[in-house]
Image (cartoon, grey):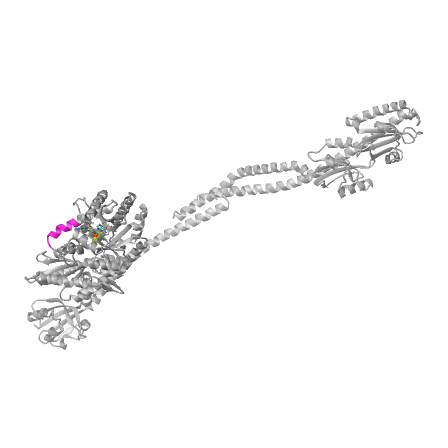
Amino acid sequence: MSIRKTVFLISFFLIALPLLFFTIYEYNMVNERILLTRSRALAEFATTQGETILQVASLMQTQSSSFTREIGQEDYTDDDLKDPLIIERINGILQGAVHEMAYTLDGSSRVMDYILLDGEGYVRASYQKDIIGNKLKGSPLYEVLTDTNPMSSFCESPFRAGEYGIWVTRRLSLNSDMLLSAFITTKVFAGQLNRMRLEQTGFGMILFDGDRVLSHPDSAYINTLIDNEEISSLYGEAMAGQVNMTGKGRTELFGVNSLYGYCVVKELGINVLVIQSVDEALITNMSFLWEAAIAGIVFAMVGIAIMMPLIQRKLIVPIIHLRESMLNATTGAYEPCLVKVGNEVGDLVNGFNRMVDQINASIMSLQHANDALRNAEENLQCDKERLKVSELRFQVATELSTIAVFELMSFTDEFFASDSWESITTYPGMDVFPREYAIRYIVHPTERPAVLKWSNNMETRFDEDLRILTSAGDYKWIHLSMAQITDEVTQVKKILGTVTDIHERVLAQERATYAAYHETLTGLPRRILFTQEVDVNLQRLRTNFWGVVFILSMDNFKRINDIFGFSVGDQAICSVAAMMQDRFEGMLYIARNSGNSFLMYAECPRNISNILELTRNILQVFKVPFAVGDLTVDIRVHLGAALYPDHGQDCSELIRNADIAMHDARYEQRQEFAIFAPSMQAKLERTHQIMEVLRELSAGRTPLVQYQPIVRASDLELLGFEVLVRIKESPIGMISPAEFIPLAEESRLIIPIGAAIMREACRKTKELIDAGHELHHMSVNVSTIQLEDPLFLDMVFDALNEVGLPYQKLQIEVTESLMISDLEISGRKLTQLRKNGIRIALDDFGTGYSSMKYLRTIPLDVIKIDKHFIDEIDLGYQNVFAVTMIQMAHDLNLEVVAEGVETEKQFRLLRDNKCDAIQGYFISRPLDFQDIDEFLVKLRKKKEELL
Ligand code: C2E
Ligand code: MG
Ligand code: MG
């Protein structure tokens, strides 16, 4: 919170809080005062009322005495009063007087009564006509009326039930027993009191005997006992003269905390009580409290408004300036604060300014120190330069320890050498053995001729790296530099020279060179070394020899990596390298070309059979699975060869062409091996073009497919179709599956393309079924690459579910090209499919080299005998294979489909030998979807012809 806000809040509370406390204190004080004055007023009011009642009583007495005087003058006897005329007259007098008085008091005549009693106590005249003639003597009222003198008392009226009032009784004359009683009801006073109510609850009441409520604004309380000790005893004490007849107090009355004022009218024996609720009495003061609070706040605001400019000038502005100066100081601007005030903030500003001065002074001295330091640093730099020079000298001196200087007398063989001679050469001196011996036995045979040559004439300077045999029996690299000189003074000839220890340097160089030329995983030469070495050898090649460069590609290396992991892949590469080196040591120079291919070089006499022989031997190595750790892995290879000088003038060209040959073997010839031919170049280009087409196809286009019918052999009933993919139109025209499927597999584009084929096949099958065709199944070819894809199962189920094709309607054809080692994984997936009702067929049965193993490992429903075996039927011999296969399949509970049935002869033989189904041009070529109906018509005709 900013200092301005803080000061404002503090000032506000400093003014407002005391004001608040004062207001509350004052409020309480005023409350007390109000209660006091209010109860005093109540007492006065009660007194006034008491006096009024008393005055009324005495008025009545005066009235009564004047009546009695008026009537008493006549001196009536009791008998006179029996005279109706006299009574009439008296009544007239009394009624007139009563009326007059009652009207004066209350405005009505119903507040007063009178009775005239004769000497025997009979009522002779009355306001209440019906009691005239009644005898009152002996009644309690008569007792009360005659009890006091002057006879005025408080008593219940016998004519008005529950109504009390003042009775004033007088004798008509001194010598008469006749009494005149006038009655005035307390309602006169109560009515007045009630009319004079104080606010809401203040009221007066009249008590009789001190304990009974005679009058109350709420009539429910009238005639009830007053349950309040204080009030009851007050009455008693006042009557007994122990307390004032009038007074005030505060008590709980009728469940309300009340103020009261009282006045006991002793003459009449009543207590006039005026009460008011305390809360009500204080209600006016409550509004005063609010007004005081608002006034306090206004006062506080005004106070602040007056004080703020002062606080602003004296406190806030200086503090803000000081803060700015301090913040500037944190950024490095040490400037004094220019505010002047004569209070503690001013002291603070002064302190800050002093500090700034000190800091500025320190900065100045620091700058001086810095300058001095910079000078020192420059000096140090000079020292460093000097140090460098001396270090260099030291280094030279150290290096000198790897150099020895020597001197050898040409004729005497006397020898002198510097100290390091022995540590370098491992011999104490040259003179330990004859010079000839040294050259012959100590120098390495390779460098020996050069030394010998020099020693024969010694005319030039000798300067060579060479190896010497150390006293420990190893060779060591030294650099020997020497020349023969003739001492000008003595004319003595001597050899002067230096020996430098270069052994470590040469070894390090050799290691680096080796690493640059050899591959780390297998230790085999790299392609660069291979090229250099082969080029050297090609130059030396004998004329009737070929230099042959092979490229051996491990085709399924990527799959091995994918399935078993890179470490198994690496081990497989190492195993191949080791095996090849072992088998062909001295015959082949082997190098690693790239991740999955090897380069090999051989020289052999110019006869093609030699090359074929060598090739066979190489391929033979891969005919058995390789042991890699605990696993056995099938390694499939393709081999390409290029010959020098026919297919290239140097190694690089030969490698390029061998690579083309290898690709040709793989994709074109579908063989394991090929020797380069110039025509292959063009084919390679076609391969690239096909790849382009495949890439486009894989980008989501629905592939074109044809449907080749499969029919039951016994009755030619249609069983289903095989779905065959087609590329009919492309920039290079039609491409056959045999050409593009291997490329699609190699590039793994078969995964998206295969998925699209599966979707199309399912969609079209559903269409056929919906159109009413009875189809047992639709057979879709699935490549091993697709099977290995982790999403393969999802892909198949999604394609089926998408169109709602029953699972039983799908047949999947797999070929024997699965690697033996991943049979298990693929087998598991196929089992999963089969459990869901999808049929599995083994395609091209009999062409792979592990057919039997497949039969055991893969869950199958059908085998499809390859066309190759069917063709043999027509040749008239060897139909035994097809027949045996049918029998074997039946023994294994498998259905048999014969593929590529082209002739009636083939059909009949197959049918006779219980082949289950046939497929081939004899029945139909693969059809476009829209031609299926037409085919079915033809099929019916064919049936009629054949069956
Ligand atoms: P495949 O699965 O063994 O298919 C049978 C091949 O034999 C088809 O060749 C078919 O046209 C051909 N054929 C059928 N009857 C006869 C006949 O009486 N005489 C002759 N000469 N040939 C007949 P196509 O369509 O060229 O397919 C070749 C191979 O390409 C297929 O062999 C299959 O392995 C593969 N292929 C075809 N379509 C697909 C596909 O959609 N996916 C996958 N992964 N491979 C496919
Ligand atoms: Mg097939
Ligand atoms: Mg086939």
Q: Which SS type dominates the magenta stretch?
A: helix
Residue 593 showing in the rendered view: no
**Looking at the image, is 430 positioned above or below residue 173?**
below
Q: Which residues are magenta?
A: 677-687
Is residue 491 covered in magenta?
no
**Looking at the image, is 660 positioned above or below residue 489?**
above
Q: Position of residue 7 (x, y in %)?
A: 51, 43
Is residue 682 covered in magenta?
yes
Q: Position of residue 500 (x, y in %)?
A: 17, 68
**Looking at the image, is 901 positioned above or below residue 288?**
below
- Of residue 282 and residue 3, the one placed in the foreground of this image is 282
How many labels were placed on the picture? 0
Q: Position of residue 432 (x, y in %)?
A: 14, 77
Choose top left, top right, bottom left or bottom right for residue 664.
Answer: bottom left
- Of residue 833 and residue 154, the one placed in the foreground of this image is 833
- Of residue 277 and residue 398, the one placed in the foreground of this image is 277
**Looking at the image, is 857 positioned above or below residue 768?**
below
Choose top left, top right, bottom left or bottom right for residue 68.
Answer: top right
- Of residue 365 and residue 85, the one placed in the foreground of this image is 85
Choose top left, top right, bottom left or bottom right for residue 533.
Answer: bottom left
247 left or right of 718 in image: right
